[in-house]
Amino acid sequence: MESSPWEVRLREQGFRITAQRQLVLESVNQLGHGTPEEILSSVQKTASGVNLSTIYRTLEVLESVGLITHTHIGHGAPVYHSQDESPHIHLVCDDCAEVTSIPAASAAQFSLDLKETYGFTAHMTHMAVTGTCKACASKSELKSNG
């Protein structure tokens, strides 16, 4: 039986293939963007004996081999997602906490300005921008006009 790409990547870097690693990776992919607690809840549907420290250790391994990545959205726990996703930026609404993903290319001009003005090369795939979403801004306008 042929190994999947994620199994090959783990083995190439000296890690064993375990049921927990498979379950965590499947949960990250299924959730799209998940905190360690959300991933734990998903994994426990299949493996009730898994605890949060196992989730954190497994996420660390999966990230170290390039299968997943994380970002910090707000002040809470990091959010993990598949490395296979296209590069994107998270827009986080301060009012309703909705998270919208936009292509990283949307910040190309900003990134270029940082490079030209400050000599700083930004990694635009590992970030969140906070503000107010369209729906919340509309509600706020209605309140102030009403």
Image (cartoon, rainbow, N blue to C red):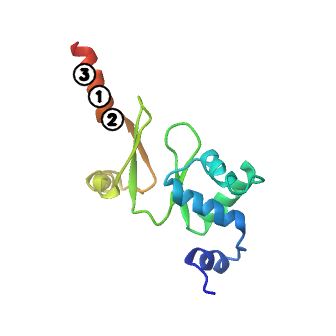
What residue is shown at x 46% (from left), y 54% (from top)?
A: 126
Q: Position of residue 94 (x, y in %)?
A: 42, 31
Task: Determine which residue is flagged by label 1.
Answer: 137
Decide which of 127, 9 is in the foreground and name it. Answer: 9
SS category of the residue bearing label 3: helix
Compared with 81, 142 (above or below) is above
The disc, 3 or 2, on the residue closer to the chain's N-terminal end is 2
The answer for how far apart the CA atoms under marks 1 and 3 are is 6 Å
Compared with 51, 15 (above or below) is below
Q: Is label 1 in contact with label 3 (beta carbons under 8 Å)?
A: yes
Task: Determine which residue is flagged by label 2.
Answer: 133
The answer for how far apart the CA atoms under marks 3 and 2 are is 12 Å
Query: For the residue marked with disc 3, what is the amino acid?
Result: Glu
Answer few, some or many: residues within 10 Å of disc 3's Cα (few below 14, many 20 plus, some between 14 and 19).
few
The answer for how far apart the CA atoms under marks 2 and 1 are is 6 Å
Left or right: where 107 falls relative to 23 = left
Evaluate whether residue 121 shows in this view: no
SS category of the residue bearing label 2: loop
Left or right: where 119 falls relative to 5 = left
Query: For the residue marked with disc 2, what is the amino acid?
Result: Cys
Answer few, some or many: residues within 10 Å of disc 2's Cα (few below 14, many 20 plus, some between 14 and 19).
some
What residue is shown at x 43% (from left), y 45% (from top)?
A: 128
Q: Is label 2 in contact with label 1 (beta carbons under 8 Å)?
A: yes
Q: Position of residue 43 (x, y in %)?
A: 66, 54
Task: Determine which residue is flagged by label 3.
Answer: 141
Answer few, some or many: residues within 10 Å of disc 1's Cα (few below 14, many 20 plus, some between 14 and 19).
some
